[in-house]
Amino acid sequence: MKYNFDRIIDRSNTHALKVDLLPKSAPEDALSLWVADMDFPCAQPILEALHQRVNRQIFGYTMYDNDRLKNAVYQWFHKRFAWDIDKSWIFFSPGVVPAISFLINILTEENDGVIIQRPVYYPFTSSIEANRRKVVNSPLLRTEDSYIMDYEDLERKFADPIVKGMILCSPHNPVGRVWTEEELKQLVEIAARYDKWIIADEIHCDLTRKGIVHHPLLKVAPEYQERIITCTAPSKTFNLAGMQLSNIIIPNQEYQKLWKEFAGERMHISICNPFGLEAVVAAYTEGEEWLEQVLTYLDGNIKFAEDFIKEHLPEAQVIRCEGTYLLWIDVRNYCNDTSRLKQIMLQAGLVLDEGYIFGIEGSGYERINIATPRANIEECMLRLKKGLHFPLSNL
């Protein structure tokens, strides 16, 4: 089946965050390319599975813990990554962000420290701070066109007794790094020296550029599996965020027990959405053809944006995007004032994720969701050019 990703689908009147939760100052014709979901229709097998489920007519309490779902999860990761997950390690969460919050509660006490690597997905910060834990930042190091981990700084941070573990973003959002096997092994070696756990958020694992390979942390470091928890979900891969079903991989039996007590007994989260279950099974068993076409289309969108910026905004820089469908663009040479930059984007008719929300290290950057029809990317680039080339008063 050949999918048409150029078709623009009207998402109004669906209560979509991406189009309905905009700043009050955003113009009526604002182009919304912020929150990380796609503007593409789901794969046909997913739609057919959902129609079939509707035809069953009853939507009662639905068990997550079933062989059909867990077999689908297992087969997907076995085929795509040669990673064999023990099915007894797979646990339900309505999302990766809730799972991270649960795990912070399970693995730490108040005032304990948790390492993150800014600029990074901002719910990491809020999940730590809202649970009265301390953010311990080990900033990524900017290279000419990418980022690397600061292993010397990580060593110092892991050595601090207040630090109990780390949240790893892999692939990294927003900078687009897909960590190499060697980089991940070096990280685990440091964590192991101080016996600290790692929560690996691998939600973007399927969304890599051609020739780039994602390495699941548990596959890279099986010898350290007792101290690693991996958060996965089909939500980014197959545009299923609203289905609220994530698969959390917990090898450690003591952690499994704590998860069941906290998530299951204390929070009473164990029953999944029946549509989420059907969507995930269909995605993981029949959605690969759609995904491969999406990846090719995303590569084209990225190339278009890179070429446009190189020609028309030479003082800006697109950070090399190895994974995710999010472009991280350095526009500091045009405007390095976060408040003014946000106003420039809004007045130009663009609702993007401002870089500063990912940490001070992101100030002067813009994150653009390129999982949208090419016409939207073309319009985005024109508006970006207009916004950065003219002062606010002339827009």
Image (cartoon, helix red, strand yellow):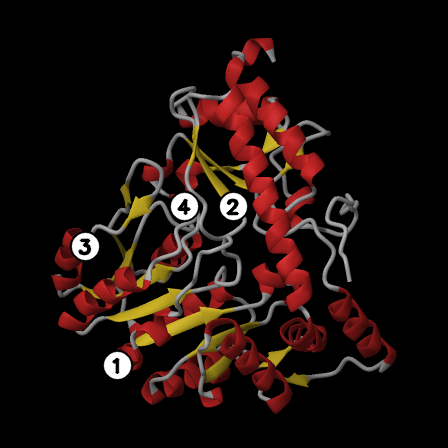
- Characterize the local packing of mark 3: few (<14), some (14-19) or many (20 or more) Cα atoms within 10 angstroms: some
Q: CA distance from mark 1 to mark 2?
A: 33 Å
- Characterize the local packing of mark 2: few (<14), some (14-19) or many (20 or more) Cα atoms within 10 angstroms: many
* Apparent side of residue 135 relative to residue 355 in the rendered image (left or right): left
Q: CA distance from mark 2 to mark 4?
A: 8 Å
Location of residue 202 in the rendering, given as x and y in whole percent from the top left corner: 44, 64
Q: Which mark is residue 151?
A: 3
User: In terms of depth relative to the viewer, which is nearer, 154 or 310?
Assistant: 310
Amino acid type at mark 3: Tyr
Picture residue at 67% right of the left edge, 69% below the top: 287
Q: CA distance from mark 4 to mark 1?
A: 29 Å
Q: Which mark is residue 79?
A: none
Amino acid type at mark 4: Val
According to the picture, the residue beneath numbered tag 1 turns out to be 223
Give SS at disc 1.
helix
Location of residue 284 in the rendering, given as x and y in whole percent from the top left corner: 62, 74
Picture residue at 41% right of the left edge, 45% below the top: 175
- Characterize the local packing of mark 1: few (<14), some (14-19) or many (20 or more) Cα atoms within 10 angstroms: few
Lower position in the chain sequence, tag 1 or tag 3: 3
Amino acid type at mark 2: Leu
Q: Which mark is residue 175?
A: 4
Tell me if I can see residue 104 in this picture.
Answer: yes
Count of labels in the image: 4
- Characterize the local packing of mark 4: few (<14), some (14-19) or many (20 or more) Cα atoms within 10 angstroms: many
- Above/below status of 345 relative to 18: above
Quadrant for residue 135, please give it: bottom left
Asked if the residues shown at circle 1 and circle 2 are in contact, with their CB atoms under 8 angstroms apart, the answer is: no
According to the picture, the residue beneath numbered tag 2 turns out to be 326
